[in-house]
Amino acid sequence: MRPVPLTSPGGPTAPAGRRTLGAKVKFATRYFLRLLRTHPSYAAGYVIVTVVVLVAIAAPVIAPYSPITADPSVYLQSPSLAHPFGTDNTGMDVLSRVIYAPRIDLAIAVIGTAISAIIGTLLGAWVGYFQGTPGIRNIASGTTMRAADVLQAFPVFVFAIALVAVFGQSINSVIFAIAFVNIPIYLRLMRSQVLSIRRMRYVEAAFVSGMPDRFIIRDHIVPNAIGPVLAQLSVNIGWSILLTAGLSFVGAGVRAPTPEWGAMIATGFPNVMTGQWWPSVFPGLALAVTVYGFALIGTSIEFMADPRRRRTLAAAQVSA
Amino acid sequence: MTEAMRGEAQSLVTRANIRQGNPASAGRASAASEGPAVIDVRDLEVAYYVYGAEPTRALRNVSVRLRPGEILGLVGESGAGKTTLARAIMRVVPRPGRIERGEIFFMGTDLGAMSEAELSKLRGRDLAMIVANPRGELNPLLRIGPQIATIAEVHLGVSRKRGLEMALDMLRAVAIPDPERRLRAYPHELSGGMAQRIVIAMALICGPRFVISDDATSGLDVTVQAQVLDLLRKLVREQNTSMLYITRDIGVAANFCDRVDIIYKGEIVEDAPTEAFFSGPAHPYSNFLFAAFSHNAELRRRWMGSAPSPESDAAEALCLYADRCVKRQVRCLAEHPALRELAAGRLARCHFPVER
């Protein structure tokens, strides 16, 4: 590691004077590139996720075959030029299905995570801020936490299966299940952050200068507590992809003809025993790499959300 | 009071004045003009309830009055109850503390009878507080400008744009170099002295009637401290704000304040105009504080009493300073002294006040 000077003259700290939007964008871009250069693993994360997203969008163009058309005459063929990832036991092209799958997996994971993050974060900020203050709000926040305890007492996977079973097997049910099982995670994460942040002197100072609670939560609590949540977000999208795939694998998620990594692994699984590994391994690899990519992005977001760590980046640049 | 003592006291005042580069004490009497009290604390008692022990009484029967434009110095050692008094006035006594008794009037209205909502309208607008370690008072993720501006926005109902203009004016008023740029700085980019000025700007942006400075300059080195104090006094005089200046530095109090209150174990033990106080403190504890700041070893020896004994709260019947007092007599252990008037405007809580 390079020696880091204490001051950072000329580094990407805020330049003097009001900046135009163009200058801001340029500054942010330069800064972002610098982050990727100093942390190659973050760059790998962004590359992975970008590729997955682009592939999902451009699936109809890149995929050599239809993902849901079975051709029984070519079932279980090993990887070849015609079928680079081989074909599965119904004769569907594995490559095309792997390419189409993120459309389903990503959509479910992103929407589910977003819903749970928004609800969980707001609830967590509220619960953490009012916990221990006298009155009805303390009782309400206690009740919320006990409800979260009950939800988290169930194993996530079993709970998700139960939810899908209750609401019927559809993509919406899977999204709902993912959102529901993740809310307590964000709730807890945010609450624990808020409990320490609200003891900070600047929160007390804001209170003593007559700031209403909603201002304190908006200006001081949420921005200071949100860092780990943002980092969690990306990691959680990865988990949610896993959960979606897991649900489909056991048959509680997306149904068979729809291209989805988990369902594909499940379909191909019996053939692995007899040596035809490709219908399961390729979707499995795609799944693993995608989840890893989201985890890396999560780490980089955590880095960027913290101005003090951002500063070390500026310093490293100067010494470079 | 001995000749040596008087000389020492005088030189302390002079030294402080020289340090501040400000010999003016003539303006003080007129600045603290007569009028209704801005803050009137009456018989305030605060106790901390610690589980499994007797409640600790942090403030006993404290009465403090501040007239418009007056700067009152509150001097005492650690644990005397200075900060508790400040927080009680803001009505933010930290748990497990409780206001047991007494009233706090602000411009004639009882703060104790106000709802939390009414109080938060007063806090930051009419009642402001400046504390030590200013960097902790600033949200590390927000730029300085918006942090200052929000206070004006909330209390004065101004727009963000106007709020930022006011913040810029305040940064100029607290003599921050390159204020336009500092408005966009993050707290970690500021030096300690600058952060202190920012916190002062935040406290004064709404033109409060009353400011508490709780040991605000103690974390700064002496030259910066002098600058900040000068600035604080200038701003307070301009806005005709009353100020409770809490400090452990009796030298600063000598130069900065119109009146001085000495607090010991939660009791006001002496209350006197600065000039009178520094030409001859009446309470033995005040003399001890004095001697502690003195370079005169003989003086220090004379007033240095025995080490404090563990606090015995039950001992209501004796003078709280009796265990340390060098002038202790039998009566001090038998009877709790009242705060009584020695001369016009001079009060001391002692059976045997030091003669001048």
Image (cartoon, coloured by chain):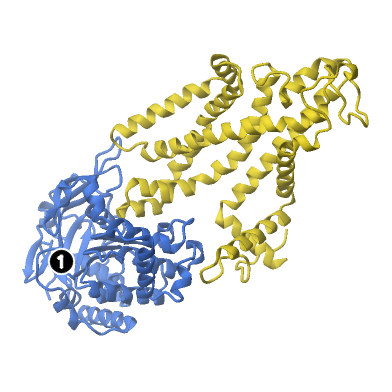
Residue depicted at x 43% and y 41%: A195
Residue B124 pos. (x, y %): 28, 58
Q: Identify which residue, A118 or B292, lies in the foreground.
A: A118
Relative depth, front residue between B16 and A19: A19
Q: Quadrant of the N terminus of chain B?
A: bottom left
Helix, strand or loop at mark 1: strand
Image check: B239 left or right of B186? left
Residue A91 pos. (x, y %) = 85, 19
Query: The chain coloured blue carries which letter?
Result: B
Query: What residue type is disc 1 on?
Result: Asp
Is B51 displayed left or right of B284 in the figure? right
- What residue is shown with label 1? B271
**Looking at the image, is B144 positioned above or below residue B178?**
above
Residue nearest the viewer, comparing A115 with B10: A115
* Rendered image quadrant of residue B279: bottom left
- Left or right side of A265 for B244: left
Q: Is residue B257 above or below residue A247?
A: below
Examine the rendered structure and indicate whether residue A6 appears above or below residue A166.
below
Query: Taking the image as drawn, is residue B85 in sight?
Result: no
Spot occupied by residue A181 in the image (x, y as percentages of width and height) = 54, 26
Left or right of A246 in this view: A269: right
Chain A colour is: yellow
